[in-house]
Amino acid sequence: MEKKVLKIADVDSKYLYEGPRYKTLGPNSGEEFRLSTLLPWLRQLRTGEIGTVDFSGTKMYSPSFLEEAFGGAVRDGFGPQVSLLVYENTDKFYEKKIKQYIKDATQKIK
Amino acid sequence: MDRNTFLGRKTQKAFILSLRKARKRKNRKYWNKYHPKEGNIGRYVSRLIRMPETIDVLQDEIGDTFVTALDQAMQDPSIGLDFRHVQTVSLRAGLLLKAFSDEYMQRYQLKPIFRCPYSEKTKAVFRYLEIRNYSVKKGRHYADLDCWHITSFDRSKDEDVPKLLTEVIIPKCLEERNEKENAPIATAISEALFNCKEHAYNDNSLFQKWYLGYGRYPHAKSFHFCVCDKGIGFRASMQLGFTQKLTFDDSRIIQEAAKGRTGVKAGKKNGRGQGLQTAIENLAYVRGEMTIMSGKGIYTAGVDEQGNALDRSFPPRKTSIVGSIIDFSIPTTYSREGR
C-alpha cells in the first residue's frame, strides 16, 4: 500500500509551535490548520493509500490544537479517513491523545 | 516705597508666610491639574482598609481580607488601601494587585488610593509591578524579587503564545534544559493562557487583560508560574454549557472543568474541555502541580513531591475571587519515567 505523508513542519514554519483552538484566539490555530491543510489533504487521499501525519520538526503540541484539528475533522464528516491515519515522530502520549480525541468526537456525533 | 518701611516686622513675617502658602496652594492646583493620576494627592479618602503583614490569596483569613479590600476599593473609589504594614507579597497576590490596579485605572482614569508601605522591599515590589513609582534606595536588590517576571496579555491582541513561552519565558527559568524537555511545561501553561482568551472574558467585559507571572527563586527546588485573570470565572463559563443551573460549589465546578466535563454534548464545540485535562496530565509528567482558584473554589491537581497523584477540591472560601488564578509549581529536576 502506498504511503502519503503530511509533514506538519513543511506545510508552514508557523506550525512549529501549534497555537490555540480557534482562529479568533490567535495565530497558528487548530481550526486554521484543519481548514487550510488537513481537510484538503484528506480529500486527496485515495482508497488504499495510508495517510501519515509526520510531526518531526514541530516543537510544541497544544492539546486544543490537536483536538480541534483531528476531532474537528471528524465533526466535519471525515471520520472514516481520520480514524485510519498513522502518526510519525510524535510522543506516544500525544499519539494516544489524538486517537482519544478522534474516538470521543466519533462517539459524540453518533 | 520699600516693603520694609511699609510693613511692621511681624506683619512682614506674616506677609511672607501667606505668600509662601499661596505659592504652595498654587503649586498644588497646578499639580492636580497636570498630574491627576499621581495617587492620593487632592483625593477624598472616606476609609482606609489596613492590609495584613503578609499578602497572599491562598491563605484563608489573609486572603479573605485582601480580596475583600480590593473588591471594596474597586466599588468605591474613595476607599484607600493601607499598605504601611505589609512586609511580604506573594507572586499570585502581586499579580492580583497588578490586575486590580490596571482595572481601576481603566475604570476611573485614576490610580487607586494607597498608603505607601514602610518596608523598602514592599516598595520595591510595587515599583517592580509598575503599580506605584515609590523611590527605593539605589543599588539595593532583592534576589527573590529580581527573579520575578510579569507578562500581560490583551484579548484584542493576537500573540504567538507557544513561541513566546518556548523561546523567551521558559528559558528564563530553566536555562539549563532544552526545548524538548520543556515542551510539556509550555503546553500546560499555554493551555491556561489560551483558556483565558477563550473563556475568561466576553465581548461585554470592559477589562480584558490577563497576566502571567513566573519566577525561580534562588536555590529553590521548584519554580512557579501563575496565570491571573479578572474575567467571568469558572462557574459562569461552565454554566454556558448546561441548560440547568449548576448547584455544585465552586471547588467542585473547577474539578469538573479540569476533568473535561463541560456539558457541551453537540455541535462544533463538543471537543471543549480536553485542554485543561491534558495540561494537568502534562504537569503530572514533569511532577508538577496546579492549583486553581476561582470564585470561592480551590482545586489542586497534578503530582505532589512524593509522587502521589493529586485530585483535591477544598472547602469553599468565605470570599469570592473575581476571575481566576492558576498557580503552577514545577520541580527543577524531575523524573521522565511513566509516559
Image (cartoon, coloured by chain):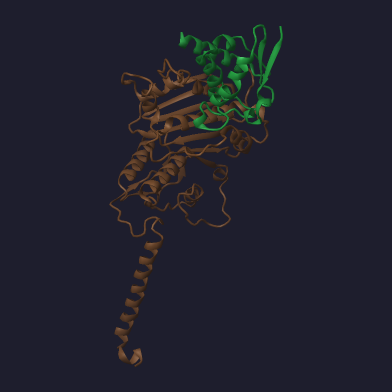
**Could you say which chain is coloured brown in the image?**
B
**Residue B224 makes an appearance in the image:** yes
Identified at 56% across, 32% down, the residue is A27
Identified at 34% across, 23% down, the residue is B249
> Is residue B1 or residue A69 the one in the foreground?
A69
Report x, y in % for residue A56.
69, 22
Report x, y in % for residue B35.
41, 60
Q: Colour of chain A?
A: green
Classify the position of the N terminus of chain B by image quarter. bottom left
Q: Is residue B327 left or right of residue B186?
A: left
Report x, y in % for residue A37.
61, 22
Classify the position of the C terminus of chain B by image quarter. top right
- Residue B247 found in image quarter: top left
Report x, y in % for residue B142.
56, 47
Q: Is residue B244 above or below residue B99?
A: above
Number of numbered labels in the structure image: 0
